[in-house]
């Protein structure tokens, strides 16, 4: 099961930061209202920014 399929199976889900090497799934992630969609290799500064978004919710 892919991550976006898993999220669609949930009634309510927590803030999610998707990480992958596949840019073609980014649109699906944003349709699920994820915090961010990070492509590998992941810049540490961007990851920290996203974690700050999650903690601030």
Image: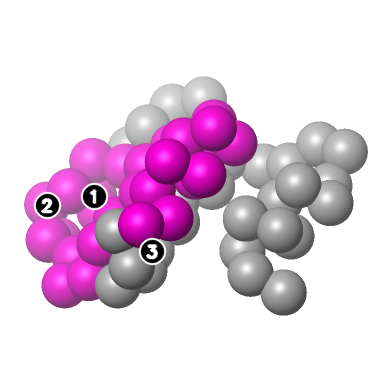
Residue 51 makes an appearance in the image? no
Tell me the residue that label 3 is attached to: 19
Q: Dot 3, crowdedness within 10 Å: few (<14), some or many (≥20)?
A: some
Please report whichever mark, 1 or 3, sits nearer to the chain's N-terminal start: 3
Element at label 2: helix
Give the camera-side residue of 23 and 19: 23
Q: Is residue 45 magenta?
A: yes
Residue at numbered disc 1: 48
Q: Give the residue displayed 12% in from the left and 61% down from the top.
A: 43
Labels 1, 3: front one: 3
Please identify the quadrant where the N terminus is shown. Answer: bottom right
Position in image of residue 20 (x %, y %)? 36, 68
Q: CA distance from mark 2 to mark 1?
A: 5 Å
**N-term mark: 3 or 2:** 3
Q: Is disc 2 in contact with disc 1, using a CB cutoff of under 8 Å?
A: yes
Which residues are drawn in magenta? 24-51
Disc 3 on helix, strand or loop? Answer: strand
* Residue 45: mark: 2
Tell me residue 16's x, y (percent).
54, 47
């Amino acid at each position: 099961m892919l991550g976006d399929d898993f999220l669609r199976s949930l009634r309510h889900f927590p803030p999610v930061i998707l990480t992958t090497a596949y840019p073609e799934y980014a649109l699906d992630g944003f349709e699920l209202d994820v915090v961010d969609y990070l492509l590998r290799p992941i810049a540490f500064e961007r990851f920290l920014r996203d974690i700050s978004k999650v903690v601030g919710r």
